[in-house]
Amino acid sequence: MTNIKDLAKMAGVSVTTVSRVLNNHPYVSEEKKNAVLEAVKVSNYHKNINAVHLSTGKTLLMGVVLPFSDHPYFGLLLKGIAKQALEYNYKLVLFQTDYMESRELEALQMLQQKQIDSLIICSRTCDLSTIEEHLPFGPIVLCENIKGNEVSTTFVNHYNIFVEALEYLYRKGHNKIGYCIGRRSGTNSHEREMAYRDFVKKYNLLYKPDYTLDECFYFEDGDKVIKQIQEMDAPPTALLVTSDQVAAGIVTCCKNRLISIPDELAIIGFDNQPIAKMMNITTIEIPLEDMGKNLFLQAVNGDLSNEELPAKLIERGTV
Amino acid sequence: MTNIKDLAKMAGVSVTTVSRVLNNHPYVSEEKKNAVLEAVKVSNYHKNINAVHLSTGKTLLMGVVLPFSDHPYFGLLLKGIAKQALEYNYKLVLFQTDYMESRELEALQMLQQKQIDSLIICSRTCDLSTIEEHLPFGPIVLCENIKGNEVSTTFVNHYNIFVEALEYLYRKGHNKIGYCIGRRSGTNSHEREMAYRDFVKKYNLLYKPDYTLDECFYFEDGDKVIKQIQEMDAPPTALLVTSDQVAAGIVTCCKNRLISIPDELAIIGFDNQPIAKMMNITTIEIPLEDMGKNLFLQAVNGDLSNEELPAKLIERGTV
DNA sequence: TTGTAAGCGTTATCAA
DNA sequence: TTGATAACGCTTACAA
């Protein structure tokens, strides 16, 4: 495998000159430049990027931590990140964690080892303190509502969104409202629970623990939700579903079982994914792609900021 | 940032000894080992992995090229790859191409530059000759039915699968059969078209170009399919749909429009994703996760092989 | 069991 | 405009 030294010999110049040509630096005569370029061509030369990294201390690699790569929520977020990455000439290193802390630690370790320049954590399992410990090694940005810390964040306000959606359902006459989430832990889930509890308190409703349905990630989980609801003696009349896929699954299942929507059960989805539009599902639009873009920018620039992006209720046919 | 030299000084040993300790090599006295470990701890030392890469010529990084990261087909494939990667202590570098050749070339370039050790291309846009040109720089494996070449491949036989499915529908009394695919180009699509044409010829059926519906990727594309079908003067009575998501979208759309399945329209999906089970869709099971695993193994080991994995018809309620 | 020193392939500093 | 040469931080013969 030819290297820069070989090129220098072939072109009859110094390695410095070769490096200059390779990196488009000024102060190289046209003549020598062509000689180098010619040598590159005939030798089929390619830079060893690892040497570049070692020398420059940069990798143009950004890590992205997410629990599942096969979920549309993260798919969309990733899309936004990837778009910016392309523009900035960065490559992405994916860490699919399945919510296992050990996988997150691997990503943090790669940051320490300078294998990646910075890290975006789309959904976190490890402690915030663990994150902070790794901050000296490079920018880490989070996708959750945390402010005034050392970490940059981009997020939507899930508390406000939840309150807004609950109030909307309440105005429509519902007072038995349940909600579906992915996992119970995590900042987002915590915010939602707070919102729900505050809502229940405000209107003097009964707080029922089983109105909170967890482990709802995919379309097919809709089945499970309906099953669980039907076993209750006082099932909710409306459901806040934090994923359009799950909402779509619920709607489908209801059609199969001849449960009328929204009469017997009202549904509000989340994200405003294409599937929600197709199935005419009322949903909360989350600007996932924009969030991805913003996360990337925070990560490359390494500047500390906490940015809230707006969400919006989209009224359709399931409420 | 402390380096191996600093550690050596701190522990009162040579850099070699430090390196030995760091890599668990034998022939280090317990005493010196502890001294080094202590130095590592107090200095909060972390290897610069780029130096390791430069020195060893390896990166433990594998590239994965796929068109969309937000599609369940590739999600499942990726899952299989990721599982093996974990076991082999490899990290994955993701290249989301949106079927743009330039993105594929970026991946190939990273292979040339030794930034990744090997490359898995889940779906290809560039020429096979382009792939072959890059083979000297590291293993490249493909997920399509190509044999006897320089490249390793793992695939299912889409020709046979299609024939089998078409025959099955024919036996069930269908002779106006259409099919939905993603893109028209690519080895898989080509195989399917061949199978379809051969089937049509075998049974002396009329070949109708508009029975081939392309750009079907997601659930929401089901709508489009039904719309297109309904505009035909002689619409197909059965559809082979190369993605369970799209099949599910079609089934959903049919329910909305009171088109009876399978009486008015029979559907066969592909992949046997969870959504197919939930919606009781007859489908062809493709061992995507296993394929992912196999692709990874071929890529790490760098041995040349072409492996066909079996697919299986799963009879459910849509035919 | 330990250490010296020569790579690995770049970039960057400095002098010419 | 050019070129020596010293980093960058690690691994690994080879010698002791």
Image (cartoon, coloured by chain):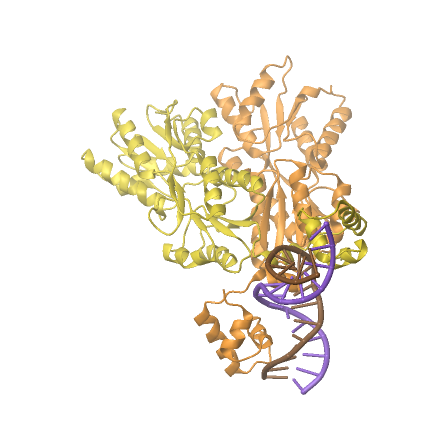
Chain colours: A orange, B yellow, C purple, D brown
Residue A118 position, x and y percent, is 67, 52
Q: Residue at x 54, y 54 (%)?
A: B116
Residue B40 position, x and y percent, is 77, 50
Q: Is residue B182 visible?
A: no
Does A51 sit above or below residue A250?
below
**Residue B178 position by quadrant:** top left
Q: Is residue B275 left or right of residue B188?
A: right
Q: Is residue B215 left or right of residue A263?
A: left
Does A180 sit above or below residue B20?
above
Q: Between residues B115 and A220, which one lies in front from this camera angle?
A: B115
Q: Between residues A93 and A146, which one lies in front from this camera angle?
A: A93
- Furthest-top residue in this view: A233
Q: Between residues A195 and B166, which one lies in front from this camera angle?
A: B166
Quarter of the image with the N terminus of chain B in it: bottom right
Q: Is residue A215 left or right of residue B138?
A: right
Q: How many marks?
A: 0
Does B31 sit above or below residue B51?
above
Q: Between residues B96 and B134, which one lies in front from this camera angle?
A: B134
Quarter of the image with the C terminus of chain B in it: top left
Residue B106 position, x and y percent, is 50, 57
**Residue B247 position by quadrant:** top left
Q: Is residue B143 visible?
A: yes
**Residue B161 position by quadrant:** top left
Q: Residue at x 39, y 36 (%)?
A: B309
Residue A86 position, x and y percent, is 56, 56
Q: Is residue B140 left or right of residue A198?
A: left
